[in-house]
Amino acid sequence: MELKRVLLGLLIPLLAMPLSSSASAEISKSTVLESIRDEGVIKVGVKTDFQPFGFLSKEGDLQGFEVDLARLIGDAIGVRVELVGVSTANRFQRLEQGLVQLVIATAADTRERRRIATAIEPGYFGAGVNVLLRPEVNIQDWAGLRGKNICALQAAYFNKGITSRFVIDLKTYKSIQNAQAALQQGECVGFLYSEIAVQGYLKKPEFSGYKANLDPALVVPWAAFVARSEKGNEFEVLLGDTIARLHRDGILIALQEKWGMAKSLYLAESRTRWSAVDGSGAPLCQRTESGEWVVECRDKAFITSADVEGVNAIFKRVEEATGMNFSFAYDKYDRDRYIKGLSTSLQLIVFSTILALLVGYLLAKCLLARSPVVGFLSRGIVFVTGTVPPLLAMYLVFFGLGAVLIADHGVRLPALGVAIVSLGLYHGAIIANTIRDSFKIEYADVVDRNLRLSDMPGILSTASVGINGAITNLVKASMVASAIAVPELLSATIGIFSDQGNTNEMMILLFVMFIVITTIWLAVVRKSQNLIVKWAGNA
């Protein structure tokens, strides 16, 4: 009995020790972890639209591989788990805002993302990307996609790597649903997304006949993420130790089987790595005195920063000295998509303004027509086009009418054209009312007088304020065009700060750019108005 007590005295401290040697490291305290324990709950951001990792059941409950992982982590900490739905575009923003304390949302571990948040090592899963191809597309390798239109999701980590490597023309959408709708309408030949999701889509009736012939590319580990401030403290260590144990015990592989997923080579290799022991039976994967895992057991981020040379090096040095990230200047990929976004925005603004002015004049002429029928019809047109917001009009035309045209007639609507028409008609209706009211003021003493083009110089004296106000709103409204995959300036800005984490720099730049664009464009419009008035006076 005495021997048993001695053995138990030796065994109990051993059982209380963590699974790694992290206890010997001097790990700083975590206020986040203390808050979690005090409140008895941890808020975890998970996906709601990515089966089988995070999705809503028929009853509306969140479930999936990552949901189960979140609950296992909650059990390890000894607290309740509060699940918070997040998306690809906002998951890191929610973390930075403190709305969640942990993100487990199919986020790949990349160097860019480690600037935004703290990645937990080891990763809990690993996967690459693939392309869901339309039935009539016979492409067997990535090279065959060169120059083809491919639908994708805004802010997805792999957009940059795939575009740079395979020279693919991506049309990015704000949601998976919009991207898939565009794919089914033939706006693109395939949908670029996680290989796991693509395999799931192939099982759905609506994608009968679709295929995924390509080998997965950009295979990287997926990591749980906590805030940047948690780097190196006990919260990060606890989470890392927990996930390492889940690998070691085969629990993550069991979750893979539970959710009917194909066998993951990443999970198999991870279990082998984290289960390995030395001659004395101690785990090979242990933490160093600094609290980091030994190098042999660490996951490496796949995507590396672009090389910096010449003038671009100046911006990189500014970033290193000030912490301000000007990737749109020194990173070729970011620079190219920013320039493309700026160019597209300018096209939207110029052509939408021209259309709005033309529509405004023609509708005003119809509103002032002496024919009751013409007046009635034109008032109906002005009411509809001026009431339906441009974003709703874009959705109705692009995804509604567009689906019918592609299905029945094989006609594809150009997204840029739809955006220009939607913006032009909406603001044209506003301008029409402004011209009509100004005409009635200018020619109040004239009976049965139709609007003529030669009347416009005189009308501009009272209508210019309203017209310029409508054009100002048009410039601002041009940002909604990204909803139908028009790669304008806002879309490019979101893509860059989602990849790089330079939200402040990019949003300030966006603010400045729209002030500059609006100011310059209004100056051009006013100059044109003055020239028209001057020309009319000389005539």
Image (cartoon, rainbow, N blue to C red):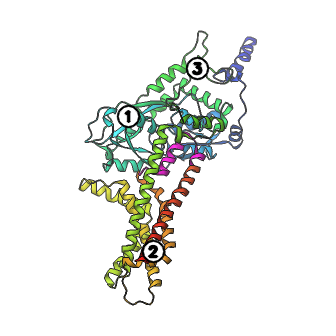
* Disc 2 residue crowd, few under 14, some 14–19, many 20+, Cα 10 Å: some
Judged by depth in the image, the label closer to the viewer, 2 or 1, is 2
Looking at this view, name the residue that lies furthest to the front: 538
Q: Are marks 2 and 1 in contact (CB under 8 Å)?
A: no
Calculate the distance from the C-alpha at mark 3 to the C-alpha at mark 2. Answer: 74 Å
Residue beneath disc 2: 533
Q: Which residue is mark 1?
A: 166
Q: Is residue 503 magenta?
A: yes
Q: How far, Cα to Cα, is label 1 from label 3?
A: 31 Å
Which residue ends up furthest to the top in the rendered image? 279
The quarter of the image holding the C terminus is: bottom left
Which of the two labelled residues, at mark 2 and mark 1, occupies the earlier sequence position? Answer: 1
Q: Is residue 386 left or right of residue 91?
A: left
Above or below, 390 against 334 in this view is: below
Q: Where is residue 310 drawn, in percent x and y?
A: 53, 33
How far separated are the C-alphas under marks 2 and 1?
A: 53 Å
User: Which structural element holds mark 1?
Assistant: helix
Tell me which numbered mark, 3 or 2, is placed earlier along the sequence.
Answer: 3
Q: Main secondary structure of the magenta part?
A: helix
Identify the residue under disc 3. Answer: 295
